[in-house]
Image: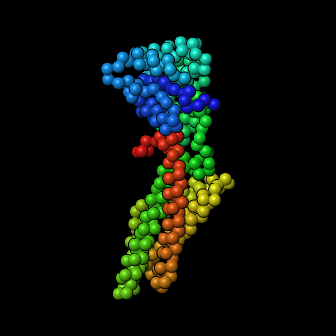
Amino acid sequence: MQTISTIYLFLSHSWRDKDFVRKLDQSLQLHGIPTFLDERDIKIGDSIPTKISEAIERSSHVAYVISKHSVQSRWVTEELDAARVRHKEREGFKILPLRIDDVEIPMGVRHLRWADFRNWEFPESYFCSLRDLLSAIGYEWTISSTTETRLFLDLHVELERAFQATLLAYRMSDLAMDIGLELSRAHSWSIEAAMRMCWHRLRDVEYLISMKAVLERLDRFREHESDRLRQLRELCSNAVSLYISEEPRGADFVSNKEIQRGGYANFEDVNYQASRILFAILSENRNVISAGLAINQHN
């Protein structure tokens, strides 16, 4: 394996592909891999051809981004020509083709195996392609492929929603019980009214749909789940059952205040525990996004 000190990547690309290249550069930088990116490393007043030539000269690899734009770019063609000369002069120097769309592979690199980044907008696909690229440059992949990481990559958006839903359920049930207990001295229906408000609020944010979606996906990891994922699955299942069983139903609603309070306190506790686990998984695996995926915050 190469050490970081011996790796230096020149990112050869068309300016039209900046979204991909900036994302790739961020991922590489966060792994501690030095890169040359024109918009960052060429300063005002610098000679562009000189800076590019110097950067290719000191590079260990040239990452050649293949796209419908780059194959028509004079600058990229000249960079690739310089890289081929460098390849002949220096042992160990490599040209790494990175294909980001369906344009035909240029003749000059057709004999080289290329990295498939054509679905780079999708987090899991980008993650896998980045891992292959890091392996190609001799960098040891440091993010473990745990069950929780695979789960996170599979449904990080759903996990975020589930976390917000469980946190809201915990807060709403706590608030509703406080209101209910405060007013129950004067009105026998106050706890029911307070909890009805809570349940309507949770319906607005599709609490039940969110919990069931996470449960369905958790079941796919059941065979290899960690203890924490097993606990999360059980908590989410309990939360769904409690939400359905304790939902206010008018005349059928349990009139005994102690039973009501016990049921809602249980619901509050289950959602609190589930939200803590979800928060821990999200917090621990966000380093996968920053160091491995560099996903746009709006995704």
**Which one is nearer the viewer's eye here, 85 or 156?**
85
Q: Is residue 252 left or right of residue 151?
A: left
Applied colour scheme: rainbow
Against 195, is 296 above or below? above
- In the rendered image, residue 239, in percent from the top left (x then y), is placed at 53, 67
Q: How many marks?
A: 0
Residue at image coords 36%, 17%: 47
Question: Quarter of the image containing the C terminus?
Answer: top left
- In the rendered image, residue 65, in percent from the top left (x then y), is placed at 49, 25
- In the rendered image, residue 200, in percent from the top left (x then y), is placed at 40, 68
Q: In the displayed orientation, state which residue is furthest to the right.
A: 223
Question: Quarter of the image containing the N terminus?
Answer: top right
Using the rendered image of the protein, determine whether residue 67 is visible from the camera's viewpoint: no
Using the rendered image of the protein, determine whether residue 297 is visible from the camera's viewpoint: yes
Against 86, is 281 above or below? below
Residue at image coords 46%, 84%: 257
Q: Is residue 32 left or right of residue 227?
A: left
Against 146, is 185 above or below? below
- In the rendered image, residue 45, in percent from the top left (x then y), is placed at 31, 20
**Which one is nearer the viewer's eye here, 37 or 184?**
37
Residue at image coords 54%, 29%: 5
Q: In the displayed orientation, state which residue is furthest to the front.
A: 5
Residue at image coords 39%, 29%: 40
Q: Residue 177's quadrant in the figure?
A: bottom left
Q: In the displayed orientation, state which residue is furthest to the left.
A: 45
